[in-house]
Image: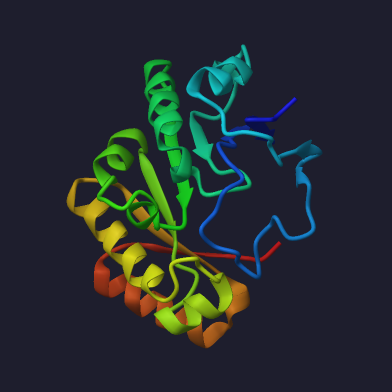
Amino acid sequence: MDNYVYTIKNKIYINLTNRCSNSCDFCIRQGREGMENTPLWITRDPVALDVISQLPANLNEYDEEVVFCGFGEPTYNLEALDEVASYLHCVDKKTRINTNGQANLIHNGDVTDVIVTSCDVINVSLNECNAQKYQLHCNSVFGQKAFDALLEFAQKCKEKGGNVIFSVVDSIGDKDVVECKKLAQKLGIPLRVRVKE
């Protein structure tokens, strides 16, 4: 059975796709089958009902925030994301997406309205301080334009009232983390520095 829902401690995560426009050299997919003994490679992208049917029956006993974050870029499966988020909001859950910020490139158009409506927190993986270094580590199918696209995506979400944060992995090095902090500050978006697992 494909696992579209998994839990870590008291938090629920939604796994919408294997597809990703990046192949990051620090990705958790490298050498892993899943998280917390739950296999996350799936044979097909789910529709909303597939996801909802796998949610725990005792939803109210879990953390109030549900996270769209699996083995791929969640915005590839935008329709399911939107519908599942709507359901979760109806049962008093908050939603967060962990995204590479390339949704507008993926869909060849602006989808930030959907993201802002669906996701209470939009965590954009900044991952580097400029386009050249980003592409070196993240290997986007969109090349160096991916970096500027993710910055624009984050700004558009913020302009539309979205609660946007950037994240970066500490393995890029102290100097680049400092430069990322400067960039985030310039854009008025908070930055969270994650420790590589």
* Residue 149 place in picture, x, y as percent: 33, 65
Quarter containing the N terminus: top right
User: Is residue 163 rendered to the left or right of residue 1?
Assistant: left
Q: Residue at x 71, y 41 (%)?
A: 41
Quarter containing the C terminus: bottom right
User: Is residue 79 rendered to the left or right of residue 194?
Assistant: left
Rendered view: 93 above or below 110? above
* Residue 57 place in picture, x, y as percent: 62, 12
Q: Residue furthest left?
A: 159
User: In which quarter of the view is residue 43 placed?
Assistant: top right
User: In which quarter of the view is residue 51 placed?
Assistant: top right
Q: Residue at x 67, y 32 (%)?
A: 6
Using the rendered image of the protein, determine whether residue 79 is visible from the camera's viewpoint: yes
Q: Residue furthest top?
A: 57
Using the rendered image of the protein, determine whether residue 93 is visible from the camera's viewpoint: no
User: In which quarter of the view is residue 102 placed?
Assistant: bottom left
Q: Which is nearer the eye, 7 or 62?
A: 7
* Residue 60 place in picture, x, y as percent: 54, 17
